[in-house]
Amino acid sequence: MRRTLLAAFIIVHASATAFANPNPKAATPAAPANPIAAQPNALTLKEKLKTLTARSTHVQSDNLIFDLPVTYNKQVSKWVSYYQVKGNKWFREWLQRSYKFMPFIQAELKKANMPTDLAYMVMIESGFSPNAVSTAAAVGPWQFIEPTGVRYGLNKNWWLDERRDLHKSTTAAIKYMKDLYEEFGSWYLVAASYNMGENGLRRQIKKYGTKDYWTLIKLSALPVETQEYVPKILAAMLISKAPNLYGFRDLEKMDPLEYETVFVPGGTELNTLADHLGVTRKSLKDLNAELYLGYIPRQVAKHAIRVPKGASTMTSSFANRSQFVY
């Protein structure tokens, strides 16, 4: 369900004003004073939104429209405040990375006719890191555990882990969330079941006779981590859509992720290829995070890799005439 401009204006403006600087002594700068207070009453809501965001060059959502249900309560406001103060440093890093990865993730969600705001789950799951590993052995940007990853088509062996691949794991996550929504009928419960597992959520819904996420929280029916999970997503979503209003200014705007795909033979080693292409080893490894050993084994006939845009011809020529020794 798509939120209206009115809902977006009320929630973003109210939350930014109330929680822009929860700790006056903290280093985080306070949000700007209300820029529309002195404006004529004749301004439309759309014009007011434009005024609110005029000082921001990094608003990531058209007219601050939300396509996930937006709840603003104590749980959400707690995380808004946390990201502004104690978590300011790494949330700023997440925001900067989001300019690189969000366009792709949201485009894939849109193609699948799903809410594009589900992309903020990746921000909370991994901070967009392909190499993130949790204490529960969940891996990659979408934090798949191995059995669920395999169930949704992500291969894992001694040299390859497709959970680390943004494109493949996003495709798998979309299929998984579609199945979860078909069963639970609520995007909040989709997120909750993604976090705690659908079997556990089924049991709690049956036990307490409700499919309302906030009611389940009040009943302490969900694990603490899951109780915090949706509020974290909503807080990240609110801040990310208008970071200036929450004190996140002068963000480094990374270029959106762009690459070309090329098949190379077994024996291709990413560090050697990066040196030849004149790109950093880290950047090429990040593009090919599924190759977590950094190379394609010789016994593999060929494998698709991603290279910077414009480098596919140079890559093919180099890989096919080179000999790699380990």
Image: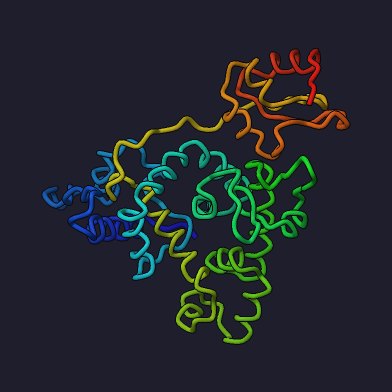
Residue depicted at 62% across the width and 54% down the height: 143
Residue depicted at 51% across the width and 77% down the height: 212
The correct choice, above or below, for 270 with respect to 27 in the image is above
User: Looking at the rendering, which quadrant does residue 218 occupy?
Assistant: bottom left
Along the horizontal axis of the image, is 139 left or right of 51? Answer: right
User: Looking at the rendering, which quadrant does residue 199 occupy?
Assistant: bottom right
Residue most toward the front? 326
Q: Quadrant of the C terminus?
A: top right
Along the horizontal axis of the image, is 308 left or right of 14? Answer: right
Please state the horizontal and vertical placement of residue 164, each as a whole percent of the image: 65, 44
Residue depicted at 47% across the width and 57% down the height: 2
The correct choice, above or below, for 313 with respect to 206 in the image is above
User: Looking at the rendering, which quadrant does residue 5 occupy?
Assistant: bottom left
Residue depicted at 56% across the width and 39% down the height: 104
Please state the horizontal and vertical placement of residue 206, each as a whole percent of the image: 63, 84
Please state the horizontal and vertical placement of residue 157, each as a whole percent of the image: 80, 46
Q: How many marks?
A: 0
| Nearest to the observer: residue 122 or residue 140 | 140
| Nearest to the observer: residue 243 or residue 146 | 146
Residue most toward the left? 38
| Colour pattern of the rendering | rainbow
The correct choice, above or below, for 184 with respect to 111 in the image is below
Along the horizontal axis of the image, is 42 left or right of 245? Answer: left
Please state the horizontal and vertical placement of residue 232, each as a whole percent of the image: 44, 61
